[in-house]
Image (cartoon, rainbow, N blue to C red):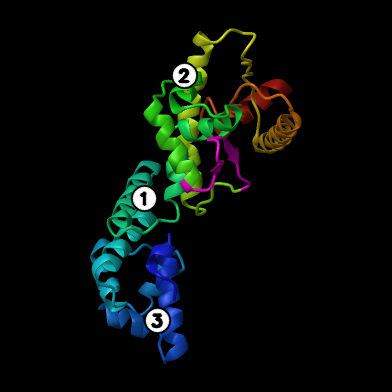
C-alpha cells in the first residue's frame, strides 16, 4: 500500500487499506466497521463510496483501526478535513495545513506545487519572463513586471520554478522553460486555478486604468441565453483559446508577457418558469 503522503483523498486511502487487508486475509466491511467501533456494518463502505462523510468523532476511530500513529494519524485527519471541506476557502486552508504538516518531516505534498504556483501571479509571470531576459538579475526582472513585485519575490519564484523543474538554469544564469506542466489532483487543481483566476481578474481591472488602449483589449456583451446556448458558447470560447495559444507558439520575436482572460459568467439568477410562460403567452396574444 502506498504511503499516506501520496494520497489526497481519504476515501481512497481507506478503500486501499480495506482492499489490502482483504487480499491477505478474510476481511469484510462489517469487520472494518466493528474494528473502528461503529454499530452500522455498512457505514464505512458508504463513506468510501462517497455516499456519506466520515464524522469528526469517527476520524480517530478509523485511524486507529488502520493502525495509524504519529504523523500518519495527523495527516489522515487533515485529509478528512480537506475532503469534507464545504467551500473553496476551507479546502485551501486544509491543503495548507497538509503542506505545513508534511514540511515538518521534510516530505512533499502532491498538490503543494500547484498551490504555490497559482498562489500569486508572480510564478506564471516569471516562468514566461525569465527566459526572455538572459543573465538578468531578479531586480531587473522585477522592474519589468507591471504589478507590484520585489527582487525577493522574483528570486523566490525562480528558486521554486527550478526546484519544481518548471525552469532550468544554464551555466550563464539564463533560464529555459521545460516541457513539464503543473499537476495536481482533480480536487485541488481546480481550487488552485480558481485562486489564480481571482488574482488575474484583479490585474485585469488595474490594467483598465494603467495601460493604454493600444496595449490592451477589453470587450463584453450582456445577453440572455439558455443552457444549450451556454454550452455552444463555451465550445466557441475553448476553440478561440486554443487558436490564440497556437498564434502565441508561432511567435518568433517575443518581447512581452500577456494574460488572456476569457470570462463568461451569470449576471442574474435563473428566471422563474412562470415568468417565461407569461412572456410567451403575451407574445402569442
- Viewer-closest of 125 and 268: 125
- Picture coordinates of residue 88, whole percent (x, y): 40, 43
Q: Nearer the viewer, mark 3 or mark 1?
A: 1
View extreme (front): residue: 171
Query: How many other residues sit within 10 Å of disc 1, few (<14), some (14-19) or many (≥20)?
Result: many
Q: What element carries label 2?
A: helix
Q: Quadrant of residue 260?
A: top right
| Mark earlier in primary sequence (2, 1) | 1
| Mark earlier in primary sequence (2, 3) | 3
The quadrant of the image that shows the N terminus is: bottom left
Q: Is mark 3 on a helix, strand or loop?
A: helix
Please say whether residue 173 is one of the residues in the magenta stretch.
Answer: yes
Residue range highlighted in magenta:
163-179
Q: In this view, does 146 lie to the left or right of 252?
A: left
Q: In the rendered view, would you say 42 is above or below 227?
A: below
Provide the residue designation for mark 2.
143
Residue 29, label in figure:
3
View extreme (bottom): residue: 26
Residue drawn at x 57%, y 27% as measured from the top left: 133
- Picture coordinates of residue 104, whole percent (x, y): 27, 56
Provide the residue designation for mark 1.
95
Q: Which of marks 2 and 3 is in front?
A: 2
The quadrant of the image that shows the C terminus is: top right
Please say whether residue 106 is one of the residues in the magenta stretch.
Answer: no
Do callouts 2 and 3 mark residues in contact (Cβ within 8 Å)? Answer: no
Real-space Cα distance between discs 2 and 3? 60 Å
Residue drawn at x 65%, y 37% as measured from the top left: 227
| Mark earlier in primary sequence (3, 1) | 3
Q: What element carries label 1?
A: helix
Can the viewer see residue 285 in this picture?
no
Amino acid at each position: 500500500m502506498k504511503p499516506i503522503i501520496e494520497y489526497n483523498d481519504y476515501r481512497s486511502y481507506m478503500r486501499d487499506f480495506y482492499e489490502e487487508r482483504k487480499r491477505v486475509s478474510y476481511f469484510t466491511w462489517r469487520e472494518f466497521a466493528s474494528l473502528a467501533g461503529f454499530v452500522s456494518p455498512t457505514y464505512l463502505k458508504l463513506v468510501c463510496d462517497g455516499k456519506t462523510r466520515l464524522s469528526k468523532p469517527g476520524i480517530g476511530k478509523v485511524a486507529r483501526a488502520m493502525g495509524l500513529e504519529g504523523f500518519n494519524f495527523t495527516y489522515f485527519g487533515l485529509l478528512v478535513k480537506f475532503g469534507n471541506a464545504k467551500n473553496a476557502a476551507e479546502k485551501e486552508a486544509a491543503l495548507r495545513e497538509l503542506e505545513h504538516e508534511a514540511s515538518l518531516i521534510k516530505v512533499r505534498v502532491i498538490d503543494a506545487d500547484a498551490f504555490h504556483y497559482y498562489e500569486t501571479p508572480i510564478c506564471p509571470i516569471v516562468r514566461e519572463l525569465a527566459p526572455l531576459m538572459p543573465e538578468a538579475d531578479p531586480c531587473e526582472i522585477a522592474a519589468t513586471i507591471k504589478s507590484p513585485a520585489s527582487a525577493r519575490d522574483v528570486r523566490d519564484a525562480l528558486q521554486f520554478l527550478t526546484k519544481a523543474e518548471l525552469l532550468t538554469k544554464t551555466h550563464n544564469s539564463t533560464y529555459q522553460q521545460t516541457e513539464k506542466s503543473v499537476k495536481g489532483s482533480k480536487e485541488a487543481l481546480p481550487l488552485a486555478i480558481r485562486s489564480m483566476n481571482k488574482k488575474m481578474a484583479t490585474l485585469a481591472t488595474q490594467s483598465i486604468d494603467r495601460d493604454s488602449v493600444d496595449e490592451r483589449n477589453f470587450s463584453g456583451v450582456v445577453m440572455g441565453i439558455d443552457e444549450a446556448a451556454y454550452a455552444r458558447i463555451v465550445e466557441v470560447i475553448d476553440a478561440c483559446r486554443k487558436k490564440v495559444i497556437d498564434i502565441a507558439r508561432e511567435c518568433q520575436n517575443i518581447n512581452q508577457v500577456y494574460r488572456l482572460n476569457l470570462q463568461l459568467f451569470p449576471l442574474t439568477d435563473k428566471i422563474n418558469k412562470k415568468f417565461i410562460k407569461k412572456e410567451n403567452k403575451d407574445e402569442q396574444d
